Image (tube, rainbow, N blue to C red):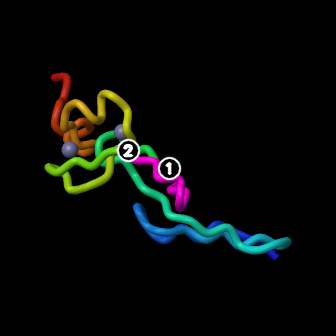
Amino acid sequence: MVFLPKLLGTGGSFRIDRPEGPPIEGDTMQCVHCMKHWTVVPGSGRQRGWCLKCGGPLCGAEKCMKECVPFEKKVYGEAPW
Ligand SMILES: [Zn+2]
Ligand SMILES: [Zn+2]
């Protein structure tokens, strides 16, 4: 039998079924600026950031917190030629 992580989209909750022990469950969030994923640990109280322009979470990195540079814009909007 193969056990694969069931990823329910981005910025949602995930559940990983394991052959032994209880499944791992948690919430994942994705930085709207650099697309970094992280796991939200319930009760940790760790605050990162939130971009009001993008309406999404930020990873907390300085460059992500300082300026609003959405990932898609960074990739497609600034062609070097
Ligand atoms: Zn980021
Ligand atoms: Zn933004």
Badge 2 element: loop
Horizontally, is 55 left or right of 22 in the view? left
Q: Are marks 1 and 2 in contact (CB under 8 Å)?
A: yes
* Residue 63: quarter of image: top left
| Residue named by callout 2 | 48
The front one of 76 and 22 is 22
Give the class, few, some or many, for how many residues have Cα within 10 Å of label 1's Cα (few <14, many ≥20).
Answer: few
N-terminal of the two: label 1 or label 2? 1
What segment carries the magenta color?
A: 39-48
Using the image, determine if residue 69 lies above or below residue 27: above
Residue 40 on image: x %, y %: 50, 56
Quarter of the image where the N terminus is located: bottom right
Q: Is residue 57 above or below residue 6?
A: above
- Residue 31 higher or lower than 22, as above or below: above
Quadrant assignment for the C terminus: top left
Is 10 left or right of 49, judged from the image as shown? right
What kind of residue is marked 2?
Arg
**Residue 64 point in image, percent of width and height:** 30, 35
Residue ID at (16%, 37%): 77
Q: Quadrant of residue 11?
A: bottom left
In screen coordinates, is 23 left or right of 30? Answer: right
Is residue 78 a member of the stretch shown in magenta? no
Task: Residue at 77% x, 70% y: name it.
Answer: 18
Q: Residue at x 24, y 36 (%)?
A: 74
Residue that numbered label 1 is attached to: 38
Which residue reaches farthest right? 20
Q: Quadrant of ligand 1?
A: top left
Residue 75 placed where, x, y %?
26, 38
- As measured in the structure, the alpha-carbon distance from the residue carrying label 1 to the one carrying label 2 is 11 Å
Amino acid type of the residue tagged 1 in the rendering: Trp
